[in-house]
Image (tube, coloured by chain):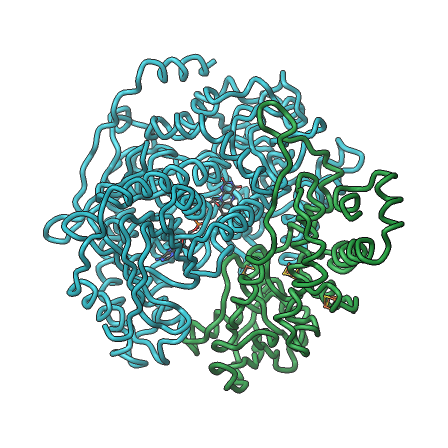
Chain colours: A green, B cyan
Amino acid sequence: MSTATFRIWRGERGDGRFEDYPTTVSEGMVVLDAVHQIQSDQANDLACRWNCKAGKCGSCSAEINGKPRLMCMTRLNELDLERPVTIEPMRAFPHVRDLVTDVSWNFRVKQKIQKFTPTAPHAADGTWRMQQRDIDRVQEFRKCIECFLCQDVCHVLRDHQLHDEFVGPRFLVHIAALEMHPLDTADRTAELREAHGVGYCNITKCCTTVCPESIAITDNAIIPLKERVVDRYYDPLKALVRLVRGGTKGESRAT
Amino acid sequence: MPDTETVEHDVLVIGAGGAGLRAAIEAAAAGVTVGVVCKSLLGKAHTVMAEGGVAAALGNVDDRDSWRVHFADTMRGGQYLNNWRMAEIHAKEAPARVLELEAWGAVFDRTPDGRILQRNFGGHRYPRLAHVGDRTGLEMIRTLQDHAVHLGIDVHMEVTVITLLTDGNRVCGAFAYDRERGRFRLFRAKAVVLATGGVGRAFSVTSNSWEYTADGQMLAYNAGAELQDMEFVQFHPTGMVWPPSVRGLLVTEAVRGEGGVLRNNEGRRFMFDDIPENYRSQTADTEEEGWRYVQGDKSARRPPELLTRDHVARCIVHEVRAGRGSPHGGVYLDIAWIKEKLPNAAEHIRKKLPSMYHQFKQLADIDITSEPMEIGPTTHYMMGGIRVDGDTQMTAVPGLFAAGECAAGLHGANRLGGNSLSDLLVFGKRAGEHAATFAKAHAAGRIDAGAVDHAARSALVAFEHGGGGEGPYHVQHDLQTMMQDLVGIVRHEDEMRQALARLDDLKRRAAGVGISGNREYNPGWHTAMDLRNLIAVSEAITRAALERRESRGGHFRDDYPDKDPVFAGFNVVLAKGEDGTMRLTRVPIPPLPAELEQVIEEQKS
Ligand SMILES: Cc1cc2nc3c(=O)[nH]c(=O)nc-3n(C[C@H](O)[C@H](O)[C@H](O)COP(=O)(O)OP(=O)(O)OC[C@H]3O[C@@H](n4cnc5c(N)ncnc54)[C@H](O)[C@@H]3O)c2cc1C
Ligand code: SF4
Ligand code: SF4
Ligand code: FES
């Protein structure tokens, strides 16, 4: 057992300061354990979110030593404990208290995205057939645990505060999952360009770097969506070629 | 109360896990106004953590499967204490509920012919669990959540209900606080559905999150509903044991479904040493037969690692007590060994069990594709809960419904893996439907201002003690350790009597806890309030466990190690007496109708 210091942001609605909490640390501990220990012994009212403690629910997002991460999946042995470990709330969202931020904007954005709209069932018993290889990509996107760390790090939201114009990487992943779903028939291309603002993304890939689910957000979701928009609005010939060659659903509809 | 906001819905659903969301969807579809309340953010409920899969006799992988086999498996697993009507409805309706998820956008893993893939799980005769790798719960909750948000349902996130309000004996609303501001919120509703999940936080080693504080069970109990089968707590055989900070975290049964085996420190597959009589004819004789089973050979029988959870957990405890455990007090779960059988084993494991791979790699520095895991039992699931009508899910309180883990009946003495996710869908839907019907048939009830005032006052009492009172986390911690030690996986009369005495003491301490800070997002305050339900549910578990002087399913007694036929005929039911104490009765189980008896008989071979 040894002692380490955690420098935690305390305060309400943006008005706050760092406070230092020394606490004992033991083998295998993660940052969330330290926060809980501090909460239990030194600061009963220290506010943070968590649920699963296993990287599955996406509740415990924070900025640890300046990096957006899940507290429950950050082992202390990866951090330099000679110096205080700083823990701050996600900075791209309005502050509530201590490590808790108001992420409700994300839930409102989701509501505005056209929902899944399936094609007619393939079999007489009302079921569908899909091949595993055709859903691998969609399943990658559906691993998203809605931790919103990608939203936190994206400069379009964090620095430019374009929350009304741009849905952010999380929801581009969501749209990609819908658009590439083999059964979906809705067309979201026009909204992508306008309401969802896919054009604001300039492919810095910061979102991909922080995703705890290792979703290739930029390469696998955003770039193909951008291509869809380009095909639809700027390159009808390319779209026609794709249609003739038999592209996937979204591509053929883009003509 | 001056700082109370009032909200009105026809149907109020408390809980936004699988059961709550499914109920809300159904109620909204019936054309009534619906509100959903949850303690966390939307999509973070326990359901998100479910791993292995959802059980439904689709017969996609083995066409010998049918509702009859699923029904018989569920009853056998529950040692026939199940509400057989629920077991019947569940087995019949689960396939339609799973297929419906696909219509709402869920993307399950596929069979080679493009249908929903199903995997083996403990106690299920055929491969029956529809799944998405080992993140099935995430797929399910996200599908329901995304579907629900387009139906005009009002969601109250991070709001905790502390009392149900009644008018005469019927329910008419709920009283709650919001975590963010600490303000009170009064819900008026014509019908209320409880879908609040389990009780795992009453124990120290658990796979459950902070949310599992038995709120629904105690809200119902205090409103006049009954609890049943509270002695049946499921200790899942495979939780992580090391490092200490992850002790209790779940290791999905799918590891065994994919061929993982249990060994003691002598390398022996000890599960072959103790196979219960009623499962012998379905269990493999040799390791080789077991392997053929997990590979889909229809002529093979399942390996003993896939016996029911209660049995596997006890065998593990037995090995550890006999000194044959692993260094950190568990046994070994080995999936890496399949490399002897499969050429691309490591890749196969990562594909089939991605989050297990991740979890061990990141939290324990263990690569499960090349070395065994250390595991041991963890408090996982509550079979008991609110007593409901099998068809409508209504409780003894008119207008109050319950579904999902907080309700009792389907699982009897032991739940089969995968039968919870299907439970949520089948009975969530039914609860939503019947709540909507009730709401249409009844006018709003009258809110009792006195009861509201009382609830508000008692919620704030911890602030009056201020920083001078004992901290709530210490009381919670002592409760958890006590319950784990005295009413855990192996129980004894003397220890449980001691537990009751300790609970009295904890009740006193809980009444005196103090809180510093203010009401805005103050987890200390929330924990102080949670203590009441945790202590009350601990008492319910202990009293029921004392009453059942036998061992059956999840309930094991050292002093009565065998099953006793006398206890096969009733459920232990608890209700609040006139004087406020817990009243316990033995309620006989109605006889099985002949057709269902027949189904069980035909599946016995
Ligand atoms: C790690 C893990 C893995 C599992 N794997 C499987 C599996 O593979 N297959 C399977 O079938 N089962 C599995 N289970 C069990 C299954 O996940 C749960 O039993 C099930 O998800 C419970 O769902 P629910 O809808 O009843 O409740 P939950 O999903 O737990 O939701 C409860 C809801 O109620 C809310 N709530 C609680 N109290 C209050 C209150 N006072 N006021 C307002 N809201 C409140 C919570 O905020 C939450 O939204 C697993 C469980 C765990 C822990
Ligand atoms: S790649 Fe695009 S979405 Fe991702 S962080 Fe950069 S700008 Fe934002
Ligand atoms: S895409 Fe990744 S980083 Fe973004 S919310 Fe989902 S899981 Fe989190
Ligand atoms: S607590 Fe669930 S992701 Fe960290």
In the depicted structure, whether residue B492 falls above or below residue A113: above
Q: Residue at x 42, y 42 (%)?
A: B29
Would you say residue B252 is visible in this rendering? Answer: yes
Q: Quadrant of the N terminus of chain A?
A: bottom right
Q: Quadrant of residue B288?
A: top right
Q: Nearer the viewer, residue B61 or A232?
A: A232
Q: Nearer the viewer, residue B181 or A222?
A: A222
Rendered location of residue A56, percent (x, y): 58, 55
Rendered location of residue B300, percent (x, y): 62, 19
In the depicted structure, whether residue B330 falls above or below residue B164: above
Rendered location of residue B287, percent (x, y): 64, 26
Q: Nearer the viewer, residue A254 or A133?
A: A254
Seen as rendered, the residue at the extreme left is B579
Q: Is residue B307 left or right of residue A237?
A: left
Q: Residue at x 62, y 69 (%)?
A: A76
Where on the image, by quarter, is ligand 4? bottom right
Q: Is residue B24 left or right of residue A233?
A: left
Rendered location of residue B129, percent (x, y): 56, 33
Would you say residue B489 is visible in this rendering? Answer: no
Q: Quadrant of residue A219?
A: bottom right
Q: Residue at x 48, y 61 (%)?
A: B41
Q: Quadrant of residue A185?
A: top right
Q: How many discs appear?
A: 0
